[in-house]
Each structure stands twice: as structure tokens, then as C-alpha cells.
Image: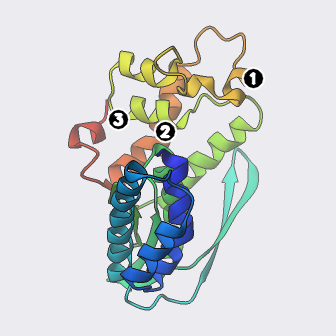
Amino acid sequence: ADRAVRQAMAARLLPLLLQGADAATVQALAEAGTEYPPGALGAQQRAAELAQLMQFAAQVREATQQPPLPAQHVHLALDVAGEPWQLQGSFAELRAEGDGWRHDRWHYDNTRPVDYLQAWLPHLLLNVQQPGTVTRVWSRDGSFVLRPVPGAAATLRTLVDLYRQGLQAPLHFFPRTSWAQATGASRSQVEATWRRGPQRPFAEEADAAHRLVLRGLPDPLDEAFVQVADAVYRPLLAALDDPRVTADAKEPA
């Protein structure tokens, strides 16, 4: 069973678990599904994944018992390189915590670098609206917290400026490879994350969009790549509490 199989069963059963469906009902629905292959091996894999899914749902339900605040609509005007830009978002699953808000998010999948980014951008915008906001994220293989960010508007301005540059020319930012760079991996580890080969057919270099826009370049992992990786991920790492990310990875290179 691969990631697609796990995701298919989770998409079907997780909403029921979060609503409080009893274990017997969920067990019957899991066995009625066609995601896993028939036979003893499929049954064993399904049972193991269902146990993990139920544990995940129980953690989320326990942590979100407090009723959420009304949805918040956030708007931020920025001046980026002399141009007016506007950011806006609507947020649910906000709860009062201390002098700020707590933004609760969950996604039943193993955490990837893009998951940190998807939590980070709303976290920054919420910290502009309500300083002191924290974000908690639950995933299949653990959880992490983003602490309050002083100067969140300035961090967003930097990211919008990078986005602006990327609208004009290919930006040398690759979520997984840039994460390896920013978290202190060796050059060989960074290149292993990027370069495809017989043992790494799904390395980030293999992405069709990357192959298209970077064609003809001798090495996209250049100095611009290093600078962008640090600009995007270093502020995030400074605010991140995640036992899966070591303290060494958060130290400036």
C-alpha cells in the first residue's frame, strides 16, 4: 500500500472520525472499502493504518474541544519595490489563547517541507492581524508549532518580493531541496535531494515544470538558490517547534 492508498482511506473515514463516529462503525466502513488489496496482507496493512488514523483523529478532537472563534478576515497592504500589493485571507479554526489566537490545522499525511510553508504563510498574516498568534499543525507522523513572529509584515514583504521576482524569471526555489539547504544538510545531501537517478527517479529535478524552465542551465543549485532558500526557510525555522527538526538545523549556516 502506498501514499495514494492511505490518503484515499483517510479522505473517506477521517471526517467521520472527527465527528465522533464510534470505532465499530468506522471499522466496518474501512473493511467495506476497496483501497487495500484483498487477503491477509491487505487486511493487516489496513488495520495498522486504521489504528494510526483513529489515533490521529482522537488527538485532533481532544485538542480542538474549545469552540472556535468566528471566522476572521485579514487584509494587508504592502509596498514592494514601489508597487502596491495586497494580501488577504479568511481563517476558521481560530481559538483564543493567552493574548492572541491559536490557529489549529491538520492534514493526514507525513509532513513535507511544503506543509511547513502552507502553515507559515497564514501564520504570518494572522500575526499581523493579531500579534501573539500561534499555529499548531497535526500530521500523520507528528505535529509542530509555529510561535509568534515579531515583524511578521516585514517577513511577508520579503516573501512577496520573491514571488514578484518569480513572476518575471524562474526563481531558484525548490521546496524539498531548499529545505535540505536551509536545514544544514551537506552539499552531497542537497544534491541527492535534487538530482534524479536510477535510485531516485522522483527527485525534485524530475518535476516537469523544473525541467522546462531550467533547461540549458548548468547548475540551478547556485548562489541564488542558497540565498532564496535561506530567505524563505530561515525565519520559519526560527519560529518552529518540531522535535523532528533538530536544534542544529535551526542555527544559521
Asked whether, in this view, residue 152 is left or right of residue 76, the answer is left
Disc 2, SS: helix
Q: Is residue 43 above or below residue 207?
A: below
Q: Is residue 251 visible?
A: yes
Q: Are marks 1 and 2 in contact (CB under 8 Å)?
A: no
Q: Quadrant of residue 35?
A: bottom right
Front position in the image: 77 or 47: 47
Circle number at residue 212 = 1
Asked whether, in this view, residue 138 is left or right of residue 205, the answer is left
Disc 1, SS: helix
Q: Is residue 94 above or below residue 5?
A: below
Tag nearer the camera, 3 or 1: 1
Most extreme residue toward the front, as rendered?
A: 39
Where's residue 242, x and y in %?
A: 29, 54
First in sequence, mark 2 or 3: give its number: 3
- What amino acid type should be assigned to the residue bearing mark 3? Thr
Mark 3, residue position: 183
Using a 10 Å C-alpha cutoff, classify the residue at mark 1 as few (fewer than 14 neighbours), some (14 to 19) or many (20 or more). Answer: few
Where's residue 119, x and y in %?
A: 49, 59
Q: Is residue 140 above or below residue 220?
A: below
Using a 10 Å C-alpha cutoff, classify the residue at mark 3 as few (fewer than 14 neighbours), some (14 to 19) or many (20 or more). Answer: many
First in sequence, mark 3 or 1: give its number: 3
Circle number at residue 97 = none
Distance (Cα) linking label 2 and label 3: 12 Å
Mark 2, residue position: 231
Q: How is the image coloured?
A: rainbow
Distance (Cα) linking label 3 and label 1: 27 Å
